[in-house]
Image: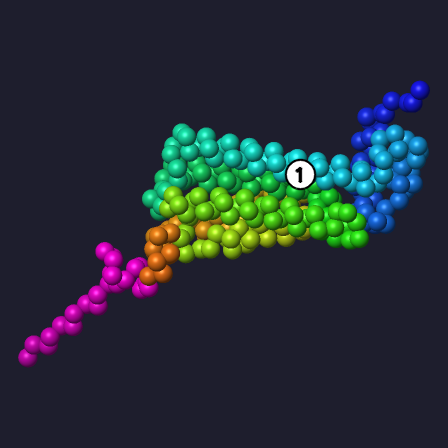
Amino acid sequence: MSRPADPKAHSALVAAARAEFVKKGLRGARIEDITAACGLSKGAFYLHFASKEALFDEVVQALASAMRALHSARTVGLEEVGAERGRLTARDVELRTPRYRRYLALETEFDQQALQMMWEHRDTLDVLIRGCAGTAFEGLVWTFLEEEVARARAEFQAMQRSGAGRGDVEAELFAELAVGAYFLVGKRLSRLAERPDLEAWASTLQRLIHGGALASRGAPGLAHARRGAPTRCGRPVGGRTAAPRRPAKRRRTP
């Protein structure tokens, strides 16, 4: 009769393996070093995992699960705000209405949660970025990023349709910019030993990424940007708001 797997041993093996993967990469890490780090035998290892790759797959799935949970909570939160207060519009952004402030607070909150999630899984991110060459996990980080870009693009396009997103910004490019910024932040987090001020980081990212993409006075809306109409002084030419006229010169009197 085989021994039942000890859940405490399982957790200890996962923690030891995550540290070993960061130091030596997935290919370089050895099972005997993982078990030695937590005071267990190789036999104990195989009670829980078929291989070190199976262990790493569990770690990756934990990261993917955390990402899905965060996206789900964010989607529900935004839908609740929309149901309570209506969809965000260009007027909300321009006048900084309570609806706009509530939306911005919610986005900042989820940005903080995203950074916290990356901090907790920073070792896994590090291995995915630079420690998976020559393994079945090579390139998986790009799959994650492509999924994130598709999600961000769809969200920004919805904001453009409501008038809250700038119409002169290409949605795909915006999504790549936003996801790329978070990717580099995640890479930076993987090199830190102490948790930084993630709340301040989230506020900065909010101002730089979301703030620059929201519609504002003088920024063309989606329909106008698609027409490609020329602008002057940040305002459309030929519309209701033409360029300001120069003041007439006064005549000299003798």
For residue 87, above or below residue 241: above
Segment tinted magenta in the rendering:
230-254
Which amino acid is tagged 1? Ala
Q: Position of residue 124 (x, y in %)?
A: 73, 43
Q: Position of residue 119 (x, y in %)?
A: 67, 42
Identified at 89% across, 44% down, the residue is 30
For residue 248, above or below residue 137: below
In-image side of 98 versus 251 (left or right): right
Q: Furthest residue to the bottom?
A: 254
**Figure quadrant of the C terminus:** bottom left
Q: Which of these two is toward me, 137 or 166? A: 137
Majority secondary structure of the magenta segment?
loop
In-image side of 212 versus 116 (left or right): left
Q: Which of these two is toward me, 162 or 22? A: 162
**Figure quadrant of the N terminus:** top right
Q: Position of residue 115 (x, y in %)?
A: 61, 42
The residue singled out by tag 1 in the image is: 64
Identified at 50% across, 40% down, the residue is 107
Residue 58, quarter of picture: top right
Residue 19, quarter of picture: top right
Q: Furthest residue to the left?
A: 254
> Which element type, helix, strand or loop, lies under badge 1?
helix
Identified at 80% across, 37% down, the residue is 55
